[in-house]
């Protein structure tokens, strides 16, 4: 009887070698390369979405168009406006009311422009809900519980030195959830002296910094 020699390890048959054996191996894809491709595709898809969400809810860049905020802001200044406080206020179902002296971006109240295009304006908050605002003889006076005799915010807040005079004839009480705004260039500004108070729902955000021109970089 013919006997076969023992094969170490109990292998049934020797493994084929050589070019013919190599050609029979199935093609394979490196899993790491596949993961890298998928990750790249997801990043490319997510980046525009993330950028859109940031601009819609967190911050946005604006360019000044016009002289109404001179000399604080100049025509063509580039600004970064923070929207996060407004976003949080809407999430909590509370009106977003900026502080007095804040520079804000807002949608022009309806009915102030004959065109169908909604304009976005940049002005400074000077009157808060419940306060009486009086503009007379070139001065702005605010009456509230803390100042029943009235005070001029232009003389008490840091922006004041840029204000020369405030033309107009106004005497009103700011409604709840609204603010009274003025441009710093009071002689050339279309603001609450003409179109009335601004509802909180119209406010887009608060000016945080000026990024251009680079020599005029400033935090607000």
Image: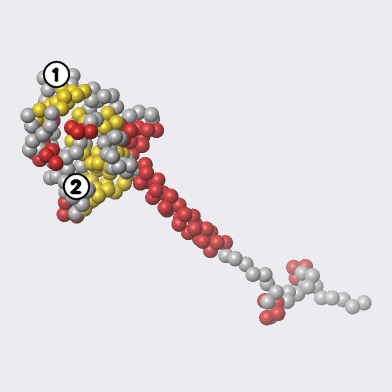
Instruction: Give neighbour class at mark 1: few <14, some 14-19, many 20+ (Cα, 10 Å).
Output: few
Which residue sits at x=45%, y=52%? 46
Q: Nearer the viewer, residue 20 or 145?
A: 145
Residue 76 percent coordinates (x, y) = 21, 52
- Find the residue positioned furthest to the bottom: 19
Q: Nearer the viewer, residue 144 or 25?
A: 144
Residue 100 sits above or below residue 149 on the image: below
Q: Work out which quarter of the rendered image holds the N terminus and state it.
A: bottom right
User: Is 158 on the left or on the right of 4, as rendered?
Assistant: left
Quadrant in which residue 171 is drawn: top left
Look at the image and name its color scheme.
secondary structure
Residue 104 sits above or below residue 143 on the image: below
Which residue sits at x=57%, y=65%? 30
Q: Quick check: can you spot residue 182?
A: yes
Please tell me how many numbered marks the rendered image carries.
Answer: 2
Do the CB atoms of the residues marked 1 and 2 lie less than 8 Å apart?
Answer: no
Q: Nearer the viewer, residue 23 or 186?
A: 186
Which residue sits at x=35%, y=32%? 89
Q: Work out which quarter of the rendered image holds the C terminus and state it.
A: top left
User: Is 85 on the left or on the right of 166, as rendered?
Assistant: right
Which label number is shown at residue 66?
2
- Identify the secondary structure beneath mark 2: loop
Q: CA distance from mark 1 to mark 2?
A: 36 Å
Residue 15 percent coordinates (x, y) = 73, 74
- Find the residue positioned furthest to the right: 1
Residue annotated with mark 1: 148
Q: Quick check: can you spot residue 205?
A: no
Q: Earlier in the sequence, mark 1 or mark 2?
A: 2
Quadrant in which residue 192 is drawn: top left
Of the two numbered discs 1 and 2 in the rendering, the one whose residue sits closer to the viewer:
2
């Amino acid at each position: 009887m013919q006997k076969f020699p023992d094969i170490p390890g109990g292998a049934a048959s020797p493994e084929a070698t050589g070019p013919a054996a190599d050609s029979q191996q199935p093609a394979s894809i490196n899993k790491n390369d596949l993961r890298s491709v998928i990750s790249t595709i997801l990043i490319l898809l997510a980046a525009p979405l993330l950028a859109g969400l940031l601009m819609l809810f967190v911050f946005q860049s604006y360019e000044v168009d016009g002289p109404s905020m001179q000399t604080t802001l100049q025509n063509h200044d580039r600004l970064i406006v923070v929207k996060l406080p407004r976003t949080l206020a809407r999430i909590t179902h509370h009106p977003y009311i900026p502080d007095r002296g804040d520079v804000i971006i807002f949608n022009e109240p309806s009915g102030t422009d004959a065109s169908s295009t909604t304009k976005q304006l940049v002005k400074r908050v000077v009157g808060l809900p419940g306060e009486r605002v009086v503009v007379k003889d070139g001065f702005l006076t605010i009456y509230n519980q803390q100042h029943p005799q009235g005070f001029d915010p232009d003389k008490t807040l840091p922006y004041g030195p840029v204000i020369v005079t405030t033309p107009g004839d106004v005497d009103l009480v700011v409604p709840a959830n609204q603010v009274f705004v003025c441009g710093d260039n009071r002689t050339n500004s279309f603001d609450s002296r003409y179109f009335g108070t601004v509802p909180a729902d119209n406010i887009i955000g608060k000016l945080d910094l000026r990024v251009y021109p680079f020599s005029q970089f400033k935090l607000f």
